[in-house]
Amino acid sequence: MRARRAATVVLSSGLLIAASPFAATSAQAAPAVPTISAKGAFLMEYGNGKVAYGKGANVRRQMASTTKLVTAATVLTSPNLNLNRKITIKKTYTDYVIQKGGSSAQLKVGDVLTVRQLLSGLMLPSGCDAAYALAEAFGTGSTTAARTKSFIANMNRKATALGLKNTKFDSFDGISQAGQNYTTPSDLAKLARHAYSNPTFRDVVKAPKYVAVATASNGKKRTYTWYNTNKLLGSYSGATGMKTGTGTAAGPCLVFAATRNGKTYIGVALNGPDRFKDAAKLLDYGFKSTTAKTMQLRSLPAGAQQD
């Protein structure tokens, strides 16, 4: 008897899968490809990089504050990194946040925080002031402008080293100066996978809340309490991070990760009005679950930063 040929099925997401002639039963039981609000999205297995879903996967888009995951990754892969290094907060950083109307970790001029603390101030409340402080501290040059410029150059070198041809940064925080801060869903997922391989990064982004005790300019202690703007944490079973972002050009964005039964998925939703539900639907698609149907998003405390 002649063997039957496997068919190639084109999903609405644009992915190609090979359908075995003997897989009809399992195919019928497989979850439907999700319909999501995001204009661009991507889902991949963390362990092997296997693509599970793509929508506009290679279309360039603004990424808003999801840029900060690359800011964090650039810091964490810097030579001779010392997470306990102390950085003094300058008026330049706080003025910048006011001028740009950016999200803030509410840092106070003259306070001294460690690199580790600033990473949480960067990733949880999406502090542009924390991003500025880290960019200057880890850049090189004789002026603030030169140091931040060199740091952004390092961010771009990281994208190049990872083979990402559709990603460019013109800022350290996602507040684009000339619209030259862009990526694609597939590129951003690869960047996220790179960042997620760092244990300190994973520790930072999984926390729903972080309390930092800093030294104030008067020598006394000041306590900062930051809440993670990623509402998927504590709402979707297994969620482990990563970063939100919102901008006029970018729209609502989210880079996310979740682990169940030893398998981790990393995903991206760019310009997604319902980004958290989008993420839950995509993760359900990967895990073959139905969590999104009943998920209730956690609420952030009154006064907490939104992003």
Image (cartoon, grey):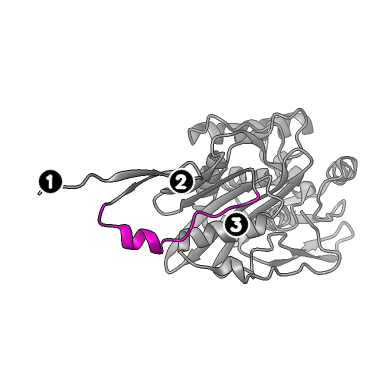
Label 2 or label 1, whichever lies nearer to me, is: 1
Mark closer to the chain start, 2 or 1: 1
- Could you tell me which secondary element the residue under label 2 belongs to? loop
Q: Is residue 42 above or below residue 32?
A: above
Instruction: Report which residue position mark 1 lands on.
Output: 2
**Identity, as a three-letter code, of the amino acid under mark 2:** Leu
Q: Is residue 34 magenta?
A: yes
Q: Earlier in the sequence, mark 3 or mark 2?
A: 2
Q: Tell me if 154 is positioned left or right of 47 in this view.
A: right
Depth check: 210 or 81 in front? 210
Nearer mark to the viewer, of 3 and 2: 2
Q: Secondary structure at mark 1?
A: loop
Q: What secondary structure is marked by label 3?
A: helix
Horizontal placement of 258 versus 93: left or right? left
Amino acid tagged 1 = Arg
Residue wearing tag 3? 279
Q: Residue furthest left?
A: 1
Magenta stretch: give its range.
21-37
User: Which residue is situated farthest in the front direction here?
Assistant: 1
Q: Is residue 142 visible?
A: no
Quadrant position of residue 206: bottom right
Q: How many marks?
A: 3
Residue in the image at 75% along x and 57% along y: 125
Q: Residue at x 84, y 56 (%)?
A: 106
| Residue at image coords 29%, 57% | 23
Based on the picture, tell me whether residue 217 belongs to the magenta stretch: no
Left or right of residue 25, residue 213 in this image: right
Residue kind at label 3, given as amino acid type: Ala
Disc 2 from disc 1: Cα separation: 28 Å
Q: Which residue is mark 2?
A: 11
